[in-house]
């Protein structure tokens, strides 16, 4: 009830009103893809606008531009995950996760005083990677084309019995005497 009123607030006067809402056409994997897309936006914004805090927490000072570049990558993956190309967005997130893991592994060097923070970050990225992979596989399976031969529609005319039969039916209809309705 509340949502229907909210939806109706933004409608123009001539638009139809929302009387009731139905089930969503989005499956659970599509919803998770959308959530991961928003997560990418938030993480990307953090990496773009506060790379110093991230590098300081991980003992990676001097790598701010790299973190900022990773932020732009996250935003791009988020945009794709929220678009109709969500499958490409999710798989780009997986590739980005692999890059993040490689970067964090390099930060585990012996002289880094923040190795504990890096280990926690690695565990978090590994968990998100698992979620990204599972969601990408589910979305790929849900939106895959059905197996078998591809349908060909180039011979279809829109006439159930073909164009020749339709032309004959029209000719018969024109020559038939019309009966006046009483």
Image (spheres, rainbow, N blue to C red):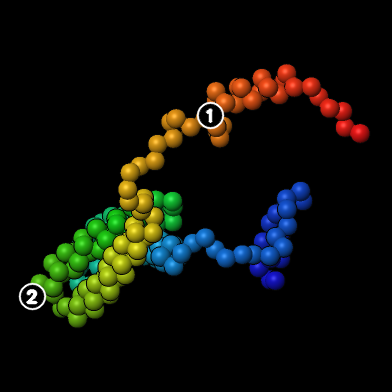
Residue to which mark 2 is pinned? 110
**Residue plotted at (60% across, 22% down):** 167
Q: Which label was assigned to residue 153?
A: none
- Residue 158 point in image, percent of width and height: 55, 33
- Residue 108 point in image, percent of width and height: 13, 73
Residue 119, quarter of the rendered image: bottom left
Camera-side residue of 13 and 56: 13
Answer with mark 1 or mark 2, whichever residue precedes in sequence: 2
Which quadrant would the C terminus be assigned to in this image?
top right
**Residue plotted at (75% across, 22% down):** 176
Extreme bottom residue here? 116
Q: Is residue 158 above or below residue 122?
A: above
Number of marks in picture: 2
**Residue plotted at (34% across, 57% down):** 140
Camera-side residue of 29 and 145: 145
Say few, some or many: other residues with alpha carbon within 10 Å of mark 2 (under 14 / 14 to 19 / 20 or more): few
Camera-side residue of 174 and 131: 174
- Residue 88 point in image, percent of width and height: 33, 52
Which numbered mark, 1 or 2, is in the foreground of this view? 1
């Amino acid at each position: 009830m509340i949502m229907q009123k909210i939806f109706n607030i933004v409608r123009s006067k001539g638009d139809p009103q929302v009387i009731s809402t139905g089930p969503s056409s989005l499956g659970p994997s599509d919803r998770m893809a959308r959530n991961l897309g928003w997560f990418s936006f938030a993480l990307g914004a953090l990496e773009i606008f506060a790379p110093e805090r991230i590098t300081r927490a991980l003992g990676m000072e001097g790598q701010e531009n790299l973190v900022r570049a990773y932020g732009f990558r996250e935003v791009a993956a988020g945009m794709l995950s929220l678009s109709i190309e969500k499958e490409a967005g999710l798989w780009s997130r997986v590739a980005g996760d692999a890059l993040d893991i490689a970067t964090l592994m390099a930060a585990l060097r012996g002289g880094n005083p923040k190795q504990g923070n890096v280990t926690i970050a690695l565990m978090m990225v590994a968990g998100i990677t698992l979620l990204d992979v599972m969601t990408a596989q589910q979305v790929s399976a849900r939106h895959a084309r059905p197996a078998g031969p591809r349908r060909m529609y180039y011979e279809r005319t829109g006439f159930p019995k073909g164009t020749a039969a339709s032309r004959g039916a029209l000719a018969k209809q024109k020559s038939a005497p019309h009966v006046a309705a009483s």
